[in-house]
Image: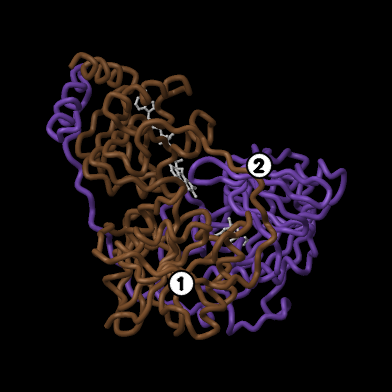
Chain colours: A purple, B brown
Amino acid sequence: MHVVVCVKQIPDPAEPGKLEGDNTLDRSGKLILDESDSYGVEMALQLVDKAGGGEVTLVSMAPNNETSGLRTALAMGAAKAILVSDDALSGAGALDTAKVLAAAIKRAEPDLVLAATESSDGYTGTVPEQIAAILGLSSITFAKEVAIDGQTVNVQRQTEAGYDEVTTSLPALVSVTAGVVEPRYPSFKGIMAAKSKPVEEVTVADLGLDASQVGTAGAGQEIVAVEDAPEREAGEIIEDDGEAFGKIVEFLDGLKVI
Amino acid sequence: MALNRIWVYAEATDGTVSPLTLELLAKARSLGDTVEAVYAGADADAVAGTLGAHGATKVLSTGDLGGSLPGVPVASAVAKAVNDGNGPDLFMAGTTYDARDIVARLSVALDKPVLTNNTDVEVDGDAVVVTTQVFGGTKLVKTKFTAGGTQIALFRPKSFVAEESGGGAAAVETLEVTEPGTAKITNRHVEEATGPKLDEAAVVVAGGRGLGEAEKFEMIETLAKLLKAAPGASRAIVDAGWVPYSYQVGQTGKVVKPTVYIAAGISGATQHMVGMKGSKNIIAINKDPEAPIFSIADLGIVGDVHKVLPKVIEALQAR
Ligand SMILES: Cc1cc2nc3c(=O)[nH]c(=O)nc-3n(C[C@H](O)[C@H](O)[C@H](O)COP(=O)(O)OP(=O)(O)OC[C@H]3O[C@@H](n4cnc5c(N)ncnc54)[C@H](O)[C@@H]3O)c2cc1C
Ligand SMILES: Nc1ncnc2c1ncn2[C@@H]1O[C@H](COP(=O)(O)O)[C@@H](O)[C@H]1O
């Protein structure tokens, strides 16, 4: 079985985010593998294992031919990667990103495409379903459990009240929630092997797409203002001296909730 | 300037329209001349009364989806209406599991961007401008749709206040599905929930990793019961398997705006704060005086949850 995993490479979420002059997110620093996507990579490796053969291909779109996040996922055990990097993609919206990723995924001809339900930095949560729509694939989002049985995909899909059992046939796209599996830590051997695994770097033109359709130009949206949100003032902060519980009870009393 | 026509994607459980749908209808009424609801389900007649009372003049119903996930069929129905020249200027939906799929599919079908995670929307001239919070809600980004036609936007829960319009029942019309979809729901599991719902409760008591171990979440449950509150959680302890995902508050969990939010052993990561900083009053208990949660707390207790919570519980039980 051949599985493609979409992996986003993002600025380290531990660092404070910054906006560029044109109000798009600053992605100029070093990028890392989005933790959300480590679940998809692990899931793919496990599914290929269970199927008794096949491989995992990574697909990523990132500026400046960034590969450090891809190397992390390759070190986990993915076989190869396709990286789309092109200056024309600066300012690309979710739909543009989906068009680019879909074109790259098509080259890999997978049985199954995995993505995360939402990225840590963009969190639009629409890219995977847009990819499925572009490729004409059946899709199941918010998977908290995935099992493949021959040509059938069975998923437990998160719902407001619990979960639904949902089924479809391959080829398909599934987006997985955080915590769906326990991502493995790359071994030293894995890290060494990842250095020589193939990463195919492609441009928008290589994918047969028109640059005017997928960057800021094609976005159909324009940021018109960035404002500071009204700040919430901090109130009274006290050190517990063993009696602070009284303050809480008093506070709740004042609000008439007890 | 008002928009001519707005469609709101309506969701309901067992014939009860979701609060989020009613919030969107209230906002839609302030922006558009005509507001109509799009509904996927066999019971459009059952929800037409409530939707009408909140300002929808029509319920455009796809009918029963035959077990399909709604993304494909509902997007196909809305896209067909738009392509036939009967679409809205703005398609609004809430940030829910199903609506995310629908707007994503619709954006591809119409080759139009979809803007998600919005907390506000306004009309500027004839352009639709939406507001999104970024960086944990510290900045507001306003984005304008620049391509004409039907705009597609998704809104976070509790962005608007629901309000009845006094309208009569909405007229039910059919919205034709052109693609039935191939992902099928074969079984539904509803997790037992007792007490008030997390996103509707007047009081929320939430616990985080500072509780130390799964068993200690009992303190949160006990306090919640005493306050007729809903228990909530940070993602750290959901991911650790201490409590189910349905307890999670934050960017990837529930948005809550209770009268009081009590955060016990929660650091106050930006992704947690976007889900609760709209609470009217916030009480935080954390042993680290530098914890970011204190920057938004009305009452902050620098202390050990294992010492403070049992005493609060004891005091309340004694009343
Ligand atoms: C894309 C993305 C989405 C996310 N979505 C969410 C979301 O929806 N909701 C969410 O909550 N998080 C979310 N997170 C995770 C978030 O970044 C934090 O990791 C998480 O909120 C931390 O949970 P916590 O506060 O329980 O744990 P920690 O950050 O570990 O904080 C524990 C706190 O407990 C305190 N403490 C320890 N012991 C005690 C004690 N005995 N008494 C009192 N205090 C004590 C510590 O001082 C510390 O402040 C998301 C992250 C990403 C990347
Ligand atoms: N630039 C990208 N490269 C690879 N995968 C991506 C990219 N953008 C989004 N994805 C995938 O789509 C998921 C949802 O992203 P988003 O819609 O931005 O929340 C991510 O978690 C990734 O799995």
Q: Position of residue B31 (x, y in %)?
A: 29, 74
Residue at the (27%, 20%) spot, across then down: B308
Dot 2: element: strand
Q: Would you identify the image quadrant in which residue A236 lies?
A: top left
Q: Chain of mark 1?
A: B
For ligand 1, give the image quadrant.
top left
The residue that mark 1 highlights is B152
- The furthest residue to the left: A254
Q: Quadrant of the image for the C terminus of chain B?
A: top left
Marking on residue B36: none
What SS does tag 1 mark?
A: strand
Residue B14 visible in this rendered orientation of the protein? yes
Left or right, B64 with respect to B220, comes to right
Same chain under badges 2 and 1? The reply is no
Relative height, residue A114 to residue A183 (above, below)? below
Measured as percent of width and height from the top left, residue B176 is found at 57, 73
Q: Residue at x 39, y 44 (%)?
A: B272
Q: Is residue B227 above or below residue B185?
A: above
